[in-house]
Image: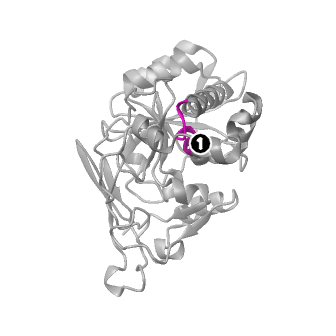
Amino acid sequence: MLLTKPQTSATVIDQHEGSIDKCSGWMDLCTDLQLYVMSVASLVSVVNIGYTSRYNFNVAQGFIKDKIYALLVAFSLPPAATLDTMKKLKAVISGSLVLALIEPGLFTPGDIDIYIPFGNMIAFVQFLDGLGGFKEVAKEDELPPYEPSGRRVTCVHQTKYFQHQASGALVNLVETRTKTPTVAVFMFHSSIVMNYITWNTVVCAYPNLTCQHKALQNTDLDTPTDRTVKCFLKYIRRGFDFLNHANEWDDKHECRRSPYCGRSTRRVDDRSTMRIGFSGELESANDLVDDSISWSLATKAPCKHNATLIQTQGHVTARNYVARVSER
């Protein structure tokens, strides 16, 4: 079933322990070589390796933590202080940077997007000011445009842009219209960017599609808006393909039931969402911001030529917010 409570890390590890070690000699590799393999692999593969033994789980967690720390340093953000601030303010990182973490080597992110609950923008700006070196800048042509979605309603209240005067690093602070900033993530233009990082967890909504560089569109228009098309082209140039519906990827999928059907209602805590903590604790609770959030995608094409399902609106539902996903 799609909507089921996920197994704990310990349960998954107990079920799979030794599967890689026995068949591929993974344990015979030195640590440096293991880390190199992880560095060029999809994060989806790294997580799968981690669930084969407790040793591999610890290695995978440590690798992911180091990668996230390195990404924050690259944008002139002190890792420990930034993650602590994200925890206090319930903020998350999303956008191209998280996709680059999940699928390394395809492109280098030009900025970092931090999504903040409604009412917490001032507090995060104060955090940046306290670091020193960051200056608020206007959105100009030479700066990367902020384009989370092509639709009119994006759940975004306001965006502030900051640039580090010494390193040139660009930090975009995005205040959402709700206390649950991840609502905005599930209103993005496609499944390829429905990923985020909390202070202790990486979340990927469509891991199997993403690691194969495929994306479901989140639009119900026959011809997407110019802005949506621009977003698609950006990721096509980075090596991703966009699908009209899940049948183009899996012609045996069950409409409205398969987790990779855009019309299926998904939850962030279901079995098909990838969640991996990096706090170092095997049994630590993954902070998903709102573990009850659910969504379905807006779709413009029928599954398996079912004409009754053309142009379906999507939705995002959180504890304190319900949004309709449509470009109509």
Disc 1 target residue: 49
Q: What segment is highlighted magenta in the picture?
A: 46-54
The answer to whether 227 appears left or right of 133 in the picture is: left
Instruction: For residue 116, say whether it is visible.
Output: yes
Q: Nearer the viewer, residue 92 or 328?
A: 92
Instruction: For residue 96, say whether it is visible.
Output: no
Residue 84 x %, y %: 46, 19
Quadrant where the C terminus lies?
bottom left
Q: Is residue 303 above or below residue 1?
A: below
Q: Which residue type does callout 1 highlight?
A: Ile
Q: Is residue 272 above or below residue 244?
A: above
Quadrant where the N terminus lies?
bottom left
Residue 305 x %, y %: 41, 86
Q: Is residue 42 magenta?
A: no
Residue neighbourhood size for the residue with mark 1, other residues' Cα within 10 Å, grouped as few (<14), some (14–19), many (≥20):
many
Q: Quadrant of residue 181?
A: top left
Q: Residue at x 46, y 54 (%)?
A: 188
Q: Residue at x 71, y 29 (%)?
A: 168
The answer to whether 112 appears left or right of 158 in the picture is: right
Q: Nearer the viewer, residue 122 or 259?
A: 259
Secondary structure under tag 1 reads helix
Task: Decide whether the magenta segment is chiefly helix, strand or loop.
Answer: helix
Q: Is residue 50 magenta?
A: yes
Q: Residue furthest left?
A: 320
Residue 155 x %, y %: 36, 47
Q: Is residue 166 above or below residue 295?
A: above
